Amino acid sequence: MQIEIICVGNELLIGKTLNTNAQWLARRVTSLGASVRRITVVGDDVDEIASAVREALGRKPRFIITTGGLGPTFDDKTLEGIAKALNRSLMLNDKALKMVKEKYEEYAKAGRMDSAELTPHRVKMAMLPEGAEPLPNPVGTAPGVRLDVNGAVIISLPGVPVEMETIFEESVVPLLKKETGDLMFFEASLHVDNIMESTLAPLIDLVMRDNPYVYIKSHPKGEERKPHIELHFSTTAKDSRVAKDRLGKAIMQLSELIKEKGGKVKTFKT
Amino acid sequence: MQIEIICVGNELLIGKTLNTNAQWLARRVTSLGASVRRITVVGDDVDEIASAVREALGRKPRFIITTGGLGPTFDDKTLEGIAKALNRSLMLNDKALKMVKEKYEEYAKAGRMDSAELTPHRVKMAMLPEGAEPLPNPVGTAPGVRLDVNGAVIISLPGVPVEMETIFEESVVPLLKKETGDLMFFEASLHVDNIMESTLAPLIDLVMRDNPYVYIKSHPKGEERKPHIELHFSTTAKDSRVAKDRLGKAIMQLSELIKEKGGKVKTFKT
């Protein structure tokens, strides 16, 4: 089950903000047995967002998850971009308006603001693409958004990490689980010293040929003077014993080969 | 001057690795007066890399910078992907081979390996797309790569951060500076409390209308119970006094408006 992530925000393109949202989503989606095919980062620009969404839809993922650009300011343009990609209008969504209204009334009651008035900038957060459904945001004002279109589900989440994570856990995880069933992602790492990546390369080739369901990737970590490599093993399976057996077999085989070449297996981590 | 960044690596798509390379490059490129239009992350797959490169070329950026996938292992496929995007072959590049060879001889002399033998996995790092030039890697074995194609320059850098950064500083910064001249990026932040983002939104609109060269973006930072917002001001200019005057004027105007609404300006940072 393939997923694409689209992150919206000039702050990502100028390097002001580290894209921890993409990592969080990628990790979470992967752990649920789905697979992230592409992550795209665009700025706060309707045409850029629209073209990223259109291109992603063209690759036929089951889900497209966007982050950022749902708030009240002029440069929160994600929903406008999605609407443009689909040739739909933005329309005031009653359910979304009710969510926004209740939030501001709650804040006003708690004494956090002068007024719960629904200013144009607040109403903006309830303007959704035609056919979309709002997803409750228990920790902020802008609702998330779900839009089903030609076999794909577009999910829009806010950029504030805690809001993104909360809406994902509450409203998106159940959708994903329905599709991936009991599939899970398993991983383990081996840290090795005293062997260069170019010496490891043919050993990895051999072990991956012998273990077709295990993916092995080497990550050089040390400095040039002192090579240190992390070997990351991963597999996806429904049964955790099957997965662990697979990883264990590949790890044992590669460890032996590394020792034969004079390398030192230092630590093993799951 | 527009730049696209393409990051290659399954570890980014499974969320194992936080994409600090993209942030580092985006920040560095922005500080040199150029502008990052899009960041794309794809896996270690020739077709995915090729389609990302082809699509990026279609948007006519001046530079495309790729990170990752230049090493000796089976899944280092960036150059194969670029070659495929351009319908070129991978060919053994003599200059690159010399760089790789000298590295391993140096390592062997320093007693780090048994042999400096040029195994197929090592030679692989010198297989470049037709017409490409290697860029020296002073801190690792895989050279960077430069390829000029139809008005765009494709730069490929390794994924190991220190190698990526070193090749960028030594071989790419001079190229970028030639194009951006003395343009520089300037920024400042204002931290404000006691005002909600939806109340700030119309104030930002007003100040941006009055200050057409200043871009202002609000970043909600606090929790829901205690709103705290960072306002980020930025501008690009050749003259640092002009830039600072612009930022100062916009910051003063917005600060006054925030105070009128009962907000508290806490700190100011450049």
Image (cartoon, coloured by chain):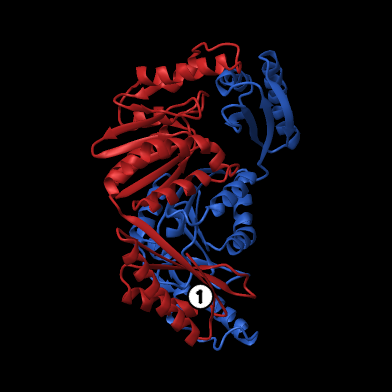
Chain colours: A blue, B red
Extreme left residue here?
Answer: B150
Please report the residue visible at 54 percent of the width from the left and 42 percent of the height from the top. B13
Secondary structure category for the residue under label 1:
helix
| Res. A180 in view | yes
Residue at mark 1: chain: B
Residue A129: x %, y % from top left: 42, 66
Please report the residue visible at 49 percent of the width from the left and 18 percent of the height from the top. B122
Residue B157: x %, y % from top left: 43, 35
Residue B6: x %, y % from top left: 42, 41
- Report the front residue among B119 and A251: B119
User: Taking B181 as reference, is A143 above or below it?
Assistant: below
- For label 1, the crowd category at 10 Å Cα-Cα, with few meaning under 14, some 14 to 19 and many 20 or more, is many
- Report the front residue among A61 and B51: B51
| Res. A78 in view | no
**Left-right relation of A15 to B63:** right
Extreme front residue here?
Answer: B241
Residue where numbered disc 1 is placed = B197
| Quadrant housing residue B144 | top left
| Quadrant housing residue A206 | top right
**Left-right relation of B175 to A21:** left
Please report the residue visible at 27 percent of the width from the left and 46 percent of the height from the top. B179
Mark 1: amino acid: Glu
